[in-house]
Every structure is written in structure tokens, then in C-alpha cells.
Image (tube, rainbow, N blue to C red):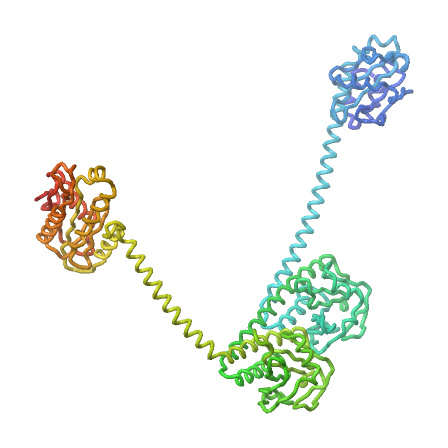
Amino acid sequence: MNLKSFTRKVSSTRDHRLLAEAIFDQLENLFSPHAIAIFEDPLTNPRCSVSFSRGELYPIQKYPEIFWDWACQFDTSESIIPLAINTCNWNHTQDLGGDSYIMMLDNTPIKRTYLLIQSVQARTAHNIYEESYDAMQLAAARWQCIRAEKNASQEMRHRDIREAQYVDEISQRERFIENMKLVQQVALEISNPDSLKDLYYKAVEALRERLGFDRTTLMLLDMKKRSFSGTYGTDESGVTIDEFHTQYDLHQLSEEYIAALSSLESNLVIIEDAPIYTAGKVVGQGWNAMLILRDGNEPFGWFALDNFIHRKPITAYQKQMLDSFGSLFSQIYIRKRQEQNVRMLHSSMVELSRCTTVSDVCKSAVTFAIKNLGIDRMAVFLTDENCSYMQGTWGTDIQGNVVDESYFFGETQNFSLINLARAVPSEVAFEESVPIYHDCNIVGFGWAAMTVLTSNSSGPIAFIAVDNLLTRAPLTSQLREVIRMFSSSLAEVLQRTQAQEAIRELNENLELEVQNRTKELEEANRQLEVLSKLDPLTRLGNRRMLEHVMQKYCALDCEEAMSFGLILIDIDHFGLFNNHYGHLEGDIALMRIGNILEHHTKDEDEVFCRIGGEEFVLLMIGSNQEEVRLRAECIRQCIEDEGIKHQHNPEGELLTVSVGYSCYKTKGKDFNFDHLYQLSDKALYQAKSSGRNCVKRYELKDPQKDQIVA
């Protein structure tokens, strides 16, 4: 096969096997070798398996191990390498039968591949390089190209598989999300029922009409009585019916259901090929499911479901929907039960709190319970802390009318239910299938319950007795909880009624004490407010006091212009005084000057304020210019007459002050303290420039011209 034909055949080959056949044909035509083989690097292929071969090949496993370390150093570009140049001290001609050659077809580290030409005839060996170089380079390139194409194809296939998995997972997730959305929507629709009974009905209807289940019944569990009772269910025609009259013993359930109630592993139990019941009678066969409802870890009921109508198997998506619906319904039920109990408790407290006597409280309690709690008959008996007697108050006759039973008085020793109630105070004790009494006479049979009302300190104070003489309705755990909560409220009101006068007196004393404390606090706050506005050294006002005075004047709502005057005083050379006499003498001098300034305020609205270390200010209102001048001069003279020694005063031997003042008229709302202060400050500066110990006034004759006058 000439090079051109070989090239055309190699270029069109898409498979390693066909390419190997072409290579083998070409090499046989050229060199007539004893054997030819293509295999992966034994260093990465310990089994030394041969991919393709022709002829009687010497076993690859028998090659020296170090030979492959030598062979792997060559690259594809080096074409065919004679084994004669190996550096392993291996006499290959003896083992292989003659001169042999090796070539690296693919130098990819994880897929390194060799071409072995074993025992070439001596007459053709000298031409092996010239005749095979181009052909083998082309073959190696094509080999690597096919390997790359296979890798790409395999990667594409893996990508398609992953994409298919993702699409399937997304589809499942979308279906799951749609189901969860439906469950959430259904839960939202039933989340605001008028009552628990309304919630039961809506839930049974929703499972059938919205979620697509054949039949369902909501059962409420009473673990204390080891029984369960119906609420609403679905008949054989798929119509929701009232099943509140039904009650069953727990042992009537199958073992799987009983075990599931006490296990926390799953809330959904499904039994295939099980009997299907209606009102306790077998009506068919199919799957039967229990969706357990829990409050925390404690079961309070379940939804019983079956496929009686359509006989379709339950799907995984329906199971997911049931799990989610059960969890959401439990939350709604618990919230509604708490809400209803709180509302009932609140209503009873409001009703009972209106009463002012013990008799009124007991009558109101019996009336409220008969009307609102679903109780047939009820009576309240007063007792002592030892429960030695029962004193009647108000109760119910055999027709269910509320009647006065204050005439009744009896012992408690011979009543087993009373002893049971005393053993579990604040809980509801009950007996099933017992005689029902009225005025010590048996009037029927059913359940009777009793609970002891206890005070916070002195023990029992009363009994509540209830029964089901009129309707024969079962005593459910929910009704017992309602009675317990109502009893707690009644006990609280009875205590409050008995101690009403003491509480009222306590409240009055407390109110008086609060008023006294409030006055003390207000006085303390007032004193703190005053202290916060005083300079602690001179007892004059400080900057806060000055701000307070300014705010008060600015708040004056007067249409007429008022006269405002500002006197600004600065002690002359006070820094020299402190340096010579010390800060203690400086503080004494400030206190003496502060005392003088305080005596020069005329009324409560005038307050001298210390606004700097030796700077004082007085804001005057309603004084004319002459009065302000006289006040300023009097202050200066009094301080000089005080005779405070100041030997380092360049102007004399006494401590003196420089005074600047200004006056102008304006409305209170237009009063600008900063402007008035600037005028007085300019006058004070002029007084200091004029030798100190003098009074200067700043007069504004023209808005464009300022003038200082003595």
C-alpha cells in the first residue's frame, strides 16, 4: 500500500480497530515483522492487556519493568524508536527474535499508548525510518484524533444523561411544588373557621373535593379513656355526614395503627388490601390509611381515608400531599383550639367578673357553662379546705333549667367521685356508666365528672359537678380541657370576690403611695433641672440657664416692641490673678463677684449667667437705656468697692471688671440674642481697649455704621 492510499484510508477511519488494521497492513507490507501490537502503557495498565495485535507477540508482562520508564520519555514526534538504544541492559533481540521498534501513538498521560513492531527482517530494517516516518506520524495523529472524538462523544453522552436526570428531577420538583401549592391553598381556605366543628367539616370536605381522595373521616383521640370518637365523615355515596354520635374503643383498631400512634417515625400509615368500613361495618376491600395528627409528640386524632368509591391506588404524590396537609391541619387545629379556649376563658372571665357576691358568681358560672360549653348539667358546691362538706349554690334540674340549690348540704365521705377529684386537684375526674344523681336521687345513667376548685393558698374552696343526663354525649378530652380551664377561671373569680374588700383597700393604699412617690420624683426632677442650669461655683446661671431665658423671651407673642438690654462683664486680668494668688483664691474671688452680681438682679426673670471662666452676662427686658447703664455702672463700682486685692493689675491694686452693654427694641418673636450679644461684645472690647474698669455702650445709629459710646 503506497503512502497516498494509506493516508486516504487513515484519514477516513473513525475507529481504533480499523485504524490498527490499516497500520498493521502498512507495516507488514513494508517490513514483514514477526508481530505487531498496540497496547496501553503498562505503568498505568498493570494487567498489560493488549488492545490490538497481529502475529506471535512476546508477552508484554515479561518486558523489564524499567524498560517502560525508558520508553515513556519519548514523544509522538520522535516516531519509531529502535529498542537497540534502550538503556536498560536488556538483550531484546534474544527475547524478541530480532531487531524491534517501539513508537508512542498517544502521549496523553492517562491514556498513553504504544505501537510495538517485533522482530523486523534484517533486509528491511535499514529502510524503516525513511519509509515509515510520515505514515506513522499521520497514524499517530489520527489515533489521537479518534481518542479525542471518543472522549468528546462520551462526555456528550454523560452530559445528556445528566441533563435527562435534571429534567426528570425538575419535573418531579414542579409536580411536588404544584401539589404543595394546592395543599397550602387548601390549608389557607380552612385556616379561619368559625369554630372547631366548622374546621372539622371543612377539612373533611377539602380532602374529598380539593385533594381528590374518595372518603375520609376525622377521628378525635382520647388517650385517657382509650377511645376515639367521630366528627364528620363520608358515606358510601361520597357525601359528608355528621358522625359525632360515634365512639369506639382503641383496641378496635388494627395493631399497625395502634403501634403508629405511639411511634414518632411516621404520621402516615397505609395498609393495602384491607377491609373498608362504614359505621363499623365492612363494605369492601382496598387500601386504608391513617393520617395521624399530633400536638408536639402527642397524638390528638387522625384522618381515616380509603379508596372505596374509585378503587384507585394511592400514589407517592398523594402521600406527600397527605403528610403536608396533616402537618398544616394540626397547626390550624391547635391554634383554633387555643383561640377558642382563650375566647371562652375571656368570655367567662368577663361574665363572672361582673358579679359582686359569691352567689352571683356561682349562678353566672352555671348559666354560662350550660349555654356556651356544651355541658348538659352543672352544679357548684362550696366546701372547706378539708372538703368535709358540700354546700349547694346554683345548679341544673333534670330538665336543664338553672335553679337555686342553696338548700342542699351534704357529707363528702361516701362519694367515690369526690375522693377521686380530691386526689387530682385542678384536673377533671370522671366515671363512665355510673348512676346520675339529682338531690340524692338516681335520675339516669351515663358519665359523671367533678373537679376541685382550689385557692392559691388555703386549698380547696368549691366543687364543680357535671354529667350528660340530657344528651348522652360522650365526654371527650376536648370537653375535659374546657371544663378544666373554666374551673380555673371560676376559682380565680371566687377568690377575688371573697377578698374584694381587702384588694380594694390594698389598691387605695397603693394608689396613695404611688401619688406620694410621683410627687417626690417630680420634686427631685425639678431640683435636678434647677441644678443643671446653675454654675456650681458662683451659684449663678450657666449656659443652659441662658438658653432657657432666651427661649422664654423668644416665645413671647407680643405685637408691641419691647426693650431688650444685655450687660456683658469680664474680670480684668483674671489670668494674672490666678497665676499669682492660685486657683483657690481665684475661685473665692469668683464667688464674691457672683454674690455681688446676684444682688443686682431685680426680679425672678433676671438671671446673671456665667458663660466663661471670667465672663458673665445679664439679659434685661423692659428696661430703658438709662436703666441698663446705671445697672452696669453700679455693678462695676460695687465690684471695685469690694476691695479684692490684685497687686498684678496694671491699672491698679484691686480686682476690677470691664463692662459692655447694648440696647434695642424689637418684638419678642423677632428677638435675636446673637445680634445683641455681638453688640455688647464690641462694647466690652472697647472698654478693655480704653483702660479697663469702665462701662461702654454699643449704639447702633445706622445699620451701616456702628458706634461705641461711653
List x then y, in percent, for residue 326.
Answer: 67, 63
| Image quarter in which the N terminus is found | top right
**Quarter of the rendering containing residue 158:** top right
User: Residue 298 versus residue 71: which sits nearer the camera?
Assistant: 298
The answer to whether residue 558 is left or right of residue 9 is: left
x 65%, y 57%: residue:
180
**Quarter of the rendering containing residue 74:** top right
**Quarter of the rendering containing residue 487:** bottom right
User: Residue 318 versus residue 280: which sits nearer the camera?
Assistant: 280
The answer to whether residue 231 is left or right of residue 89 is: left
List x then y, in percent, for residue 439.
Answer: 65, 90
x 35%, y 63%: residue:
521
Q: Is residue 443 visible?
A: yes
List x then y, in percent, for residue 306.
Answer: 76, 67
List x then y, in percent, for residue 363.
Answer: 55, 85
User: Residue 451 versus residue 29: which sits nearer the camera?
Assistant: 451
| Image quarter in which the C terminus is found | top left
The correct choice, above or below, for 140 with respect to 219 in the image is above
User: Residue 286 versus residue 347: which sits nearer the camera?
Assistant: 347
The correct choice, above or below, for 611 with respect to 66 in the image is below
Q: Is residue 120 visible?
A: no
The answer to whether residue 396 is left or right of residue 40 is: left
Count of number-bearing discs: 0
